[in-house]
Amino acid sequence: MVPADQGGGVMRIDVLTESVPGLDEALAAVDAFDATLVGGLLRPQPAQTAGLTELVNAVAGSPLAARVAEAAEKAAAGAASEDHLVVLAAARTALLGAAHDALTARIQEATGRPGGDESVPEPEGAQAANVRAAARSWLSDLARSGWQGIDHDLVSCAAQIVSAMLPDPALRRLATLLDGFAAELAASCPGATMERFPVRRWADLWSRGMLLTLPGAGGPPAAGTATGRLLPLGVDLQEHATAVQAQVHAVFEPADGTTARLVRASVSVPKPDTVVGAGLWQLLRPHMSLLAAVSEGRSMDLAGMPVTAEGDLLWSDAQARAGEPADAFATARVALPTAADPVVAPLDRHPARIAVPVFLEGYAASTDEGEVTFTVAGQALAVDTDRVPAAGPLTPEAVAASGACIALLRWEYGTYRVQPLAVETTVRKKAVTVHAGAWAGGTTDKNGVKAEKAATDAVAVLRERAGRLLRK
């Protein structure tokens, strides 16, 4: 894959297909520990003791070794304190962090882009120790009962803790996690009747929650400011039954001429379950002008925009104005290859959080039983078309007929996969670009207009009903 005319499409896919030393062993240890949480740690069985031992062996030789060994011994005896459970959560998080770092190192080798060289600032000490302690106590009770032992009485204890946390911005991150986790658990109660559990997901939420209860772990992110030009690459739309988020991935070129870097700008809003498809943009648009720039193919000029060390723009329309036209594929070919990847905070180092913008071209796309694959220089790369949102004109068929693609490189199901954000393809013998976020700022597309109208009607009805209730 060395032809010079591929420009930004030059990416070493072969690096992504090679095995990563130690990765399987680390993930196996995580799985073994996660299995202990299914039955709970109140009266551990021999299989659970074996799972704890596997976690101990995985971190042997690390600074955590002695404390993890002690915590595992206490847990195996059914006598683990809250502090011991925090140590076990930290060991699990460290293993996933190591897996994340190994996988992202491969991505940097494949893309040839520079990594972020600035460290993430230490969070400031947090207040409200009593509320954090209450959250840690609840999470510890969950670990002791296990997923099989959850019931409504145990799960409902989270509600009062969440209510006490929400007024404090420093605790909002933990409060949101606990609220969502408790909702998932409540929908599955009683655990004794469940045949299957989302073992990895619930263990992720549990361990992250345990660590966020530590002083300073969940405070607001430290932020600097960004002044310069923002060149959008594409939009990742994530939808839930009650909420939706749009995350714009972009290259930021600082006005002072320092190295360009990759950044993200996100907007999240609650939504009624009747608003779907292109109608979602109506809920998001009023909160971020960047969405209109994405649809119009424009850059944005930023002046003092708050930005975290991890490359997240804390978007404020007051600090941004529309700039010159900027084609996303030109950005991908010219600016993306030399843009520095953002750093990742320790608690965010997890394989599931990998989403790195990449550019591919010169590949051969094929479809087998609905699964699309890009073949580059003889190497196959899986394409995740299931993540392509219905709220835009990009379709699996357009992806399968494409010759160039802006995508997010992820690691899922034990392999690297790409999630298309935009493609270059041919329609009626004419070269066209199709973007997943093309309708973000509005659309004249027939299907998009129809979905927008349906959303407008649904929102109007809901607002009228809400107003009627308030008047009573």
Image (spheres, rainbow, N blue to C red):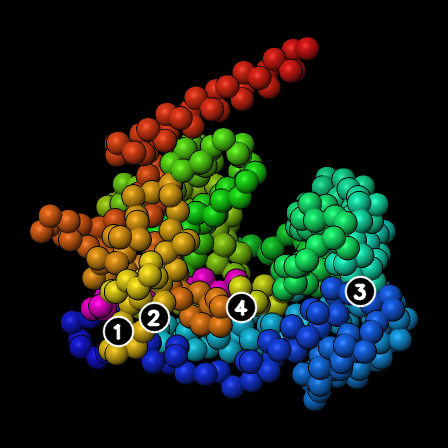
Tell me which amino acid carries mark 1: Val
Helix, strand or loop status at disc 3: loop
Marks 2/4: CA distance? 18 Å
Point 50% across, 19% down: residue: 461
Check the image and report above or below for 378 versus 318.
below
Q: Can residue 259 be seen in this view?
A: no
Reading the image, the residue beneath label 4 is 351
- Label 3 Cα crowd, 10 Å radius (few <14 / some 14-19 / many 20+): many
Instruction: Choose the circle earlier in sequence order: 1 or 2.
Output: 1
- Label drawn at residue 316: none
> Magenta segment, which residues?
353-364
Q: Is the C-beta separation of discs 1 and 2 under 8 Å?
A: yes
Instruction: Choose the circle earlier in sequence order: 1 or 4.
Output: 4
Instruction: Choose the circle earlier in sequence order: 3 or 4.
Output: 3
| Residue 356 covered by magenta stretch | yes
Residue 113: image quadrant is bottom left
Depth check: give the residue in front, 195 or 98: 195
Reading the image, the residue beneath label 2 is 381
Marks 2/3: CA distance? 39 Å
Helix, strand or loop status at disc 4: helix
Which percent across, then down, holds residue 397?
Answer: 26, 52
Point 53% across, 64% down: residue: 352
Instruction: Choose the circle earlier in sequence order: 3 or 1.
Output: 3
- Label drawn at residue 376: 1
Tell me which amino acid carries mark 4: Pro
**Of circles 3 and 1, which is in front?**
3
Tell me which amino acid carries mark 2: Leu
Marks 3/4: CA distance? 25 Å
